[in-house]
Image: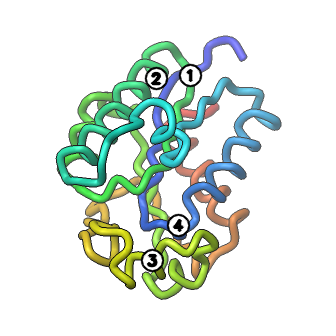
Amino acid sequence: MTGQKGFTIWFTGLSGAGKSTITAALVKELKDRLHLKVEVLDGDVVRTHLTKGLTFSREDRDTNILRIGWVCELLTRNDVIAVAAVISPYRETRSKVREMVGAGKFVEVYVAAPLEVCEARDVKGLYKKARAGEIPQFTGVSDPYEPPENPEVVCNTHQESVQESTAKIIARLREMKLLD
């Protein structure tokens, strides 16, 4: 599509909340139906390539998020839609990424689900390992998650379908005049 505007969609939420699931559905919609240029930065994938070697200390988590934010800003500046699906537990760091990307070009999507729901969905067994003390500094268990105070979109994945969440995001992007 010519004339495409770049922007960043930043999914944040606990592990198991549904960030990757909604991201996949949204990206399919943006690419297949709307024929837009979209790149995805998934937290698990990024940690194996871009930020390999970083720990889960507060400092390293912030470094991880700021690096992902820098890539999002670069893509946004070049008229690509950047979609980041990362826990990004700290408000201050997410705020820095919002500033980096720029006003009106950053769409924070809070993927909300109660901790019990996230634990029940945990196919990797990470919450079980965290509760057993095998994973230190695990967000939501032994490390805090600071929910966004004013996200552009909230997806309550324990109450709505993936299709409802995706439609809500598309509608908000249109309201913000990011999609025609």
**Residue neighbourhood size for the residue with mark 2, other residues' Cα within 10 Å, grouped as few (<14), some (14–19), many (≥20):** many
* Measured Cα–Cα span from mark 4 to mark 2: 23 Å
**Residue neighbourhood size for the residue with mark 1, other residues' Cα within 10 Å, grouped as few (<14), some (14–19), many (≥20):** many
- Decide which of tag 2 and tag 3 comes sooner along the chain: 2
* Measured Cα–Cα span from mark 2 to mark 1: 5 Å
- Decide which of tag 1 and tag 3 comes sooner along the chain: 1
Q: Quadrant of residue 64?
A: top left
- Residue drawn 52% across the image and 48% down it: 44
Mark 4 element type? strand
* Measured Cα–Cα span from mark 3 to mark 4: 27 Å
Q: Which residue is mark 3?
A: 129
Q: Which residue is mark 4?
A: 155
| 142, 108: nearer the viewer | 142
* Measured Cα–Cα span from mark 1 to mark 3: 38 Å
Q: Which residue is mark 2?
A: 76
Q: Residue furthest bottom?
A: 116
Verify CB contact (< 8 Å) between mark 2 and mark 1. yes
- Decide which of tag 3 and tag 4 comes sooner along the chain: 3
113 shown above or below 102: below
Q: Which amino acid, mark 2?
A: Thr
| 34, 59: nearer the viewer | 59
| 180, 91: nearer the viewer | 91
- Residue drawn 81% across the image and 35% down it: 32
Q: Which amino acid, mark 1?
A: Val
Q: Which amino acid, mark 3?
A: Lys
Verify CB contact (< 8 Å) between mark 1 and mark 4. no
Question: Residue 148: x, y in percent?
Answer: 30, 61
